[in-house]
Image (spheres, coloured by chain):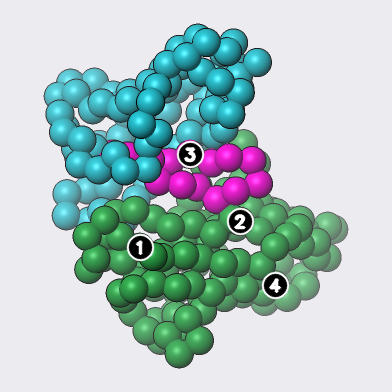
Amino acid sequence: GNSVTQMEGPVTLSEEAFLTINCTYTATGYPSLFWYVQYPGEGLQLLLKATKADDKGSNKGFEATYRKETTSFHLEKGSVQVSDSAVYFCALSDPRSGAGSYQLTFGKGTKLSVIP
Amino acid sequence: NAGVMQNPRHLVRRRGQEARLRCSPMKGHSHVYWYRQLPEEGLKFMVYLQKENIIDESGMPKERFSAEFPKEGPSILRIQQVVRGDSAAYFCASSPQGRAHEQYFGPGTRLTVT
């Protein structure tokens, strides 16, 4: 079955530090990969996505590259801000494999705290 | 264009009571999904519905839980005879026809069972 493993938090960084949150996956097919962000008290918002190998998703200064050879989709940002403090979820769907096309599989989430 | 709406945002129920959670999808979206987020966990798929049809309920507990998406009105997730283990955040998502992987999430309902 499909699964997503992401680095455990919490992660605490100073403002303007470099961020990496690791995410690896297992999937039987050819998944699409996503990063969602959950700000305190809110629902999940799609941050970025990539649908095929070597694609790079990017948004709001965040980037992640779909690496098929390492089955990874690590999230990076060059300079974090206090407003980036949130929980980040890596997720996948598998558009070609029946239920996997709509059942998003999530990692457990990584809590990021950015201090001034 | 309003996003996915869920209400209530917070719901407190005593053990044995019923909980009803509502979800209005984004305008133009005909597919609805419910996920549950237990503390310190990622979201877990529960059920996928289209108007008047349950497409996949494989993630939903067999007892006490039910879901519907009527022709008119919001989707409802119903939990009968709640227990403390039902305490969680319940998220609804919706997607447009033919794009099930593009799911837009609501703010969630946080259910607390006392």
Q: CA distance from mark 4 to mark 3?
A: 28 Å
Say if the magenta span includes residue B40.
yes
Q: Relative to B78, does residue A64 appear above or below in the rendering? A: below
State which quadrant residue B99 falls in.
bottom left
Q: Main secondary structure of the magenta part?
A: strand
| Between discs 4 and 1, the one toward the N terminus | 4
Q: CA distance from mark 1 to mark 3?
A: 17 Å
**Res B106 visible:** no
State which chain disc 1 sits on.
A
State which chain disc 4 sits on.
A
Mark 2 and mark 3 residues within 8 Å of each other at the beta carbon: no
- x then y, percent, for residue A90: 52, 63
Residue highlighted by disc 2: A109
Please tell me the numbered disc located at residue A19.
4
What is the three-letter code of the residue carrying label 3? Arg
Q: CA distance from mark 2 to mark 3?
A: 14 Å
Q: Secondary structure at mark 4?
A: strand
State which quadrant residue B28 falls in.
top left
The magenta region covers: B32-48
| Between discs 4 and 2, the one toward the N terminus | 4
Q: Relative to B113, does residue A70 appear above or below in the rendering? A: below
Please tell me the numbered disc located at residue A93.
1
Residue highlighted by disc 3: B36
Query: Which chain is represented by green in the image?
Result: A
Residue drawn at point x = 61 percent, y = 56 percent = A109
The colour one sees for chain B in the rendered image is cyan
What is the three-letter code of the residue carrying label 1? Ser
What is the three-letter code of the residue carrying label 2? Gly
What is the three-letter code of the residue carrying label 4? Leu
Q: CA distance from mark 4 to mark 1?
A: 25 Å
State which chain disc 3 sits on.
B
